[in-house]
Image (tube, rainbow, N blue to C red):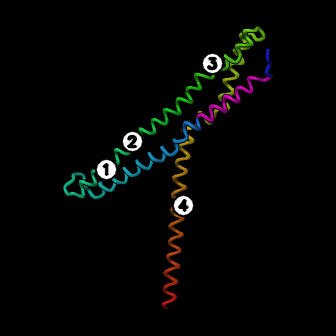
Amino acid sequence: MLTIPKYLVISVAVYSAFLTVAMMIIGRHLIPVIAGKNAAEAQFRSIGSHLRERGMFTPTSQGEIEQHRSLSGALDDVIARWRALCFQFMRTTLVSQGNVLVAPVIGWVLCAPKYLVGTMSLGEAAQVAAAFITVQAALNWLVENYSGLADCLSSINRVASLLLALDQLEHDGGTQAKDINGVSNMTG
């Protein structure tokens, strides 16, 4: 009989690493999907706010009809982005909640050989399986919190891109001021 010392510790580490990699692969599109949903909602609010400010709730001219069509298109985009987000949440939920169902089974399966041979009692097997689940749950913090982290990273990316755009505007504004001053100094 082959004896692997500390096989439960090794197996919980391997299982947790596998689950973390699986979540990162399956959830890799979640951040851009959240960002796309937020952008679509912002566009929809912008178009709706613009129409409200102009007081055009009943389209009468061709331009107003086009603006109402753009509002309808923006709403369709928001709905499509929400569908994509729901699909991504479903995929990540399958991984995290599938783990809740599979982890206890793996703990018991790993204890079964020792129990069947008689070197481990049923009570010890239950305790070891419970310990396996507890350690595995502690190691899989990322799996359980992936959706929240993706939402946070999406917001961070949006703020970072805004700051970069503002820095670029400031840089471009400074360059234009130098060009204007340089031209005025040459002519003056």
Residue at 25 percent of width and 55 percent of height: 56
Residue 20: say if magenta: yes
Residue 138: say if magenta: no
**Amino acid residing under circle 4:** Leu
Q: Report helix, strand or loop for mark 1.
A: helix
C-alpha separation, residue under disc 4 versus residue under disc 3? 49 Å
Residue position marked by numbered label 3 in the rendering: 105
C-alpha separation, residue under disc 1 versus residue under disc 2? 14 Å
Image: 30 above or below 12: below
C-alpha separation, residue under disc 1 versus residue under disc 4? 29 Å
Q: Which mark is residue 187?
A: none
Residue position marked by numbered label 4 in the rendering: 164
Residue position marked by numbered label 2 in the rendering: 80
Residue at 75 percent of width and 9 percent of height: 117
Label 4, residues with CA under 10 Å away: few <14, some 14-19, many ≥20: few
Residue position marked by numbered label 1 in the rendering: 71
Question: Which of the two marks, 2 or 4, is nearer to us in this view?
Answer: 2
**Amino acid residing under circle 1:** Leu
C-alpha separation, residue under disc 2 versus residue under disc 3? 38 Å
Q: Report helix, strand or loop for mark 4.
A: helix
Residue at 54 percent of width and 59 percent of height: 163
Q: Earlier in the sequence, mark 1 or mark 2?
A: 1
Q: Which residues are magenta?
A: 5-22
Q: Earlier in the sequence, mark 2 or mark 3?
A: 2
Label 1, residues with CA under 10 Å away: few <14, some 14-19, many ≥20: some
The front one of 136 and 10 is 10
The quadrant of the picture occupied by the N terminus is top right
